[in-house]
Image (cartoon, helix red, strand yellow):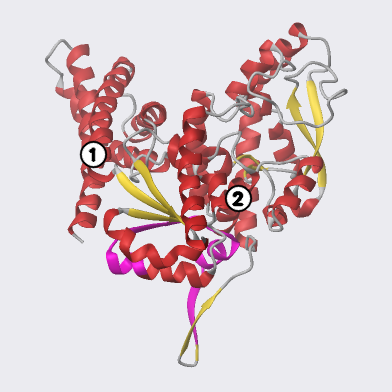
Amino acid sequence: MPFRIFKSIFIYLMAFGDLVLIIGGFFAAFKFRFSGQVPGVNWEPFIQITPWVCLATLILFSGLGLYPLRQHEFTALIRRVITGILAIFISTIAITFWVRGFAFPRSVFVLAMPIQVLLVCAWRYFCWHLQRWLYGRKKVLVVGSPAEVMKFLGKPFDLPRGWFEVRDLLAPEDLGRLPSLLPSMDAVLIAPSLSRTYKADVLSACLKARREVYLIPDLYDIMLSHGSLQQLNDLPVVEIQELCLSWPQKITKRTFDLAVSGAGLVLGSLLFLGCALAVTFTSPGPVFYTQERVGYRGRPFLLYKFRTMVRDAEKITGPILAKENDPRITPVGRILRASRLDELPQLINVLKGNMSIVGPRPERPYFINQFIKETSNYHYRHLVKPGLTGLAQVYSKYSTSAVDKLRYDLYYIRNYSLWLDLKIILQTIPLVLGGEGSQGEKEQTDPEKQEAIHTLVNSINQTASGKEG
């Protein structure tokens, strides 16, 4: 209990530090602009809008996912901070205009930004290391069959060193060893295929030993996560709603899509024209690339993109996923893919109603048929319109398996809200700035990581064979 209380306090301390440094950045900019002595006629209006600036900071940083204690890479954290400060810059200008008018020089806004970036990044660097020292270095026990564990065990190894250390693996048939292993562990990671009975046994043992539990969800777990407690007479029951959006949610989402796509096409018209000219003059072929994708309720539609590959790129190979250094991608196409500008024409799809701003990634029928063979629940992702961005696009990588992306998509459908859409849009911005998720499928994996995974899995097999002998 004291650990959980301190964990909550740590988040509030981070937020308080952010506010102090954001306002401090503005104060330093005032001091620099006026050579030390800030005129009251300029400073007093800023004091009046300070509460609104603080509120905007908390909303934006929260939307960017900067307050939950997550195991980010520090570079990804910095991109989110920079995105947040840029948004604060825009928000402060808007607040100043609507509340007080421009009562102080615009140069203060420009000077404040680099100061705030340096201050907040330094603060978050300290918090990141402190968080890793306090909450990281967790010794993890993984529970699941060796064949299944091999598919996801690389994920903890991909995290920055110092967060998690996979110490042991436990096959379902060896759960009798769990009580003896828990004292030397900090957390347990449960594979999705573990039976309900086994999951209940593991959870009960972990709660008794006061150990953290991480569960990789399947469809049952995701559906249950949003259930509501009801009663039949005096019998408590959990009501599970249908996996779809309600009519009010659909109306809200469509209104939001029309507003954002319409504004995006108008405000981005010059950028749209620039991309079209760049594609036209750098490689032969059409400006736009149209391709059949699967949309809402499994209905096919034509998706629009700026062409980023050479003409007839799949004429010989047929439908294949792009690789990390795919020779079919043109130099301009590589830039468009890294910045996600190749997807700008999809705003037309949103206006037409084929797509949404936020939703699962629209896939091609060829790959859909393959994914359905891997998991029978894949068709559930078509219960909402596909999106320009989405939860899976934000939190996963290009090379993330279709099954893992499906978990994000199902969670999004189950927990849809306008605030969730806004958070996903905000978190897409630093993703675009970093060029992540657009490099293509990696062809090779880290040999050291693979060796460590095989060593752990082999330890299970040796234990199991020893018992059989």
Q: Which of 246 and 402 is in front in this view?
A: 402
Residue displayed at 56% across by 35% down: 397
Is residue 223 inside the magenta stretch? yes
Give the residue at the far bottom of this rendering. Answer: 233
The residue under label 1 is 133
Left or right placement of residue 219 versus residue 172 in this view = right
Q: Could you say where residue 408 lies in the image, as x and y percent from the top left?
A: 56, 49
Neighbours of disc 2 within 10 Å: few (<14), some (14-19), many (20+): many
Of badges 2 and 1, the one in the foreground is 1
Q: In this view, does 252 lie above or below 176?
A: above
Residue displayed at 73% across by 41% down: 363
Q: Give the CA separation, mark 2 to mark 1.
A: 33 Å
Left or right placement of residue 268 versus residue 452 in this view = right
Q: Is residue 291 above or below residue 142?
A: above
Secondary structure at badge 2 equals: helix
Q: Could you say where residue 27 lies in the image, as x and y percent from the top left?
A: 19, 24
Q: Taking the image as drawn, is residue 420 in sight?
A: yes
Q: Which of 136 and 285 is in front in this view?
A: 136
Secondary structure at badge 1 equals: helix
Give the residue at the far right of this rendering. Answer: 315
The residue under label 2 is 409
Residue displayed at 21% across by 55% down: 3
Q: Could you say where residue 343 lies in the image, as x and y percent from the top left?
A: 67, 29
Is residue 466 inside the magenta stretch? no
Magenta residue span? 205-231
Q: Taking the image as drawn, is residue 48 in sight?
A: no
Left or right placement of residue 210 versus residue 236 in this view = left
Label 2 is placed on what type of residue?
Asp
- Labels in figure, total: 2
Label 1 is placed on what type of residue?
Trp
